[in-house]
Image (cartoon, rainbow, N blue to C red):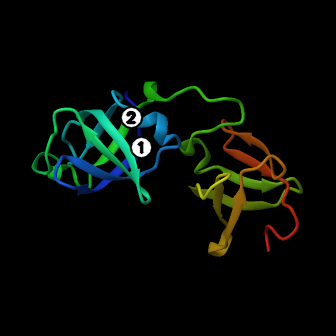
């Protein structure tokens, strides 16, 4: 059975030449959206995905703007709005040690080195120098855990467990 991974959602068109606005959920937009790469558009339930080959990529404000080969104007891409862009598992790249895909981290349980369970990683923010993991604990409390060596002690993808050494003030 094929495994698919979300890389973005088409939220609108941009201009009249077939460009679409994408809210990215990919860890590596520069590599993922390179010219010639293939993405699969999932639009309507039960319908087979549409294979799209990237013609161009650029950033505009907080969006990734893409064009696809064979789609030259707004009328041809209008129907893509609200569609989800995905890749197959075999399109995932091998990562360096200490690098993880978002889908591997989201859902992991976070525990301190003292054994206190904080909650589960719900999402990952990429504000700048390092990613920040949003951990939702009991009674809805949220913790923002920066993914830096001094704090994240170990990541066990198989066991879905992340161990952190919280610095002073991190959990208050």
Q: Name which residue lies at 80% across and 67% down.
A: 170
Q: Name which residue lies at 88% across and 67% down.
A: 168
The image shows residue 38 at horizontal and vertical percentages of 33, 30
The image shows residue 94 at horizontal and vertical percentages of 58, 26
Q: Which residue is mark 2?
A: 87
Q: Name which residue lies at 16% across and 39% down.
A: 71
Label 2, residues with CA under 10 Å away: few <14, some 14-19, many ≥20: many
Label 1, residues with CA under 10 Å away: few <14, some 14-19, many ≥20: many
* Residue at mark 1 to residue at mark 2: CA–CA distance: 7 Å
The answer to whether marks 1 and 2 mark residues whose Cβ atoms lie closer than 8 Å is yes
In the picture provided, is 9 more to the left or to the right than 127? left
Residue 27 numbered mark, or none: none
| SS type, badge 2 | strand
Quarter of the image with the C terminus in it: bottom right
Q: Which residue is mark 1?
A: 7
Does 48 appear above or below 76? above
């Amino acid at each position: 059975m094929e495994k698919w991974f979300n890389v973005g959602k088409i939220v609108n068109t941009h201009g009249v030449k077939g460009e679409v606005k994408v809210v990215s959920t990919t860890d590596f937009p520069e590599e993922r959206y390179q010219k010639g790469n293939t993405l699969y558009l999932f639009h309507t339930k039960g319908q087979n995905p549409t294979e799209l080959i990237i013609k161009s990529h650029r950033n505009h404000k907080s969006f990734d703007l893409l064009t696809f080969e064979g789609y030259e104007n707004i009328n041809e891409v209008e129907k893509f709005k609200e569609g989800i862009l995905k890749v197959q598992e075999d399109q995932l790249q091998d990562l360096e040690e200490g690098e993880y895909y978002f889908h591997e981290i989201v859902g992991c349980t976070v525990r301190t080195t003292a054994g206190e369970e904080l909650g589960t990683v719900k999402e990952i923010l990429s504000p700048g120098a390092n990613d920040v993991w949003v951990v939702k604990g009991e009674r809805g409390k949220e913790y923002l855990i920066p993914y830096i060596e001094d704090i994240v002690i170990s990541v066990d993808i198989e066991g879905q467990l992340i161990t952190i050494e919280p610095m002073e003030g991190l959990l208050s």
